[in-house]
Amino acid sequence: MAQAATQPALTLNSFAEIIALAAEKRDITTRMSLERDVRLVRCEDGRLELALEKSAKSTLINDLSRKLGEWTGKRWMVIVSAEQGAAPVKVQNEQREADLKRGVRADPLVAAVLEKFPGAEIVSVNQPNAPDAPEGTPPDNSEND
C-alpha cells in the first residue's frame, strides 16, 4: 500500500492570517471569536498570546489550539496573557470606519450635501486604492448586527 503524502505545515505569521484562515475554513464561530472576544498580545508561527474579553467562551483557548493544529499541521501554543493587548479587531475596524466617516463629513462638499438634505447620513465610505489596514486588522466584511 502506498503511503499518503503528508502536506507541508502551513506557516502563519500574523493574527490577520489566522483570522483569514478561519474564514477560509468557513469556521465563522472561530473567526467571530477572534475578531470580537480577544485582544492580541503577540503572534508568531506556532504561538499565539491573547488577552480575553468577558464575552469569550471558556473553551476558546483550547479550541483555538486544536483548530490551529489541525489547520496548519503543527502544534500551536495558545496562551492567555496577563497583558492588556490591542483592542479587539472588531473595535479597531469600527474606530477606523468612524474616523473615515468623520473625515468625509468634514469635506466641504459633503457637509453642504448633508446640510441640504436634513436627516441624510453617511452609511459607508469606500476608498479606491486605499493602503492595506495595519497588521492584525483585516477589514470587517460581515454584515452589520
Image: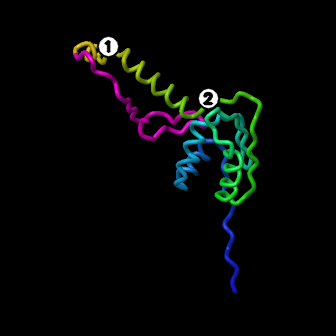
- How is this picture coloured? rainbow
Label the magenta part by its dominant secondary structure: loop
Kindly identify the amino acid type of the residue bearing the numbered disc 1.
Pro
Q: Total marks drawn? A: 2
Residue extending farthest front: 58
Question: Dot 2: within a 10 Å radius of its alpha carbon, few (fewer than 14), some, or many (20 or more) residues?
Answer: some
For label 1, the SS is: helix
Q: Position of residue 16 (x, y in %)?
A: 59, 42
Out of 23 and 111, give the one closest to the viewer. 23
Highlighted range, magenta: 117-145
Say above or below: 68 vs 111: below
Q: How many other residues sit within 10 Å of disc 1, few (<14), some (14-19) or many (≥20)? A: few
* Residue 145 shown left or right of residue 47 in the figure: left
**Residue 21 position (above or below residue 120):** below
Percent of width and height locating residue 63:
67, 50
Instruction: Give the number of the disc on residue 87.
Output: 2
Going 73% across and 45% down the picture, which residue do you hit? 78
Q: Which mark is residue 27?
A: none
Residue positioned most to the bottom: 1
On whether residue 17 falls in the magenta region, the answer is no
| Residue 20 higher or lower than 140, as above or below | below
Residue 54, quarter of the rendered image: top right
Q: Give the CA separation, mark 2 to mark 1.
A: 32 Å
- The quadrant of the rendering that contains the N terminus is bottom right
| Residue 15 image offset from top left, x and y in percent | 63, 42
User: Where is residue 89 shown, x and y percent of the image?
Assistant: 57, 34
**Residue at coordinates 68% horizontally, 63% vertically from top-left?**
8
Residue located beneath label 1 in the image: 108
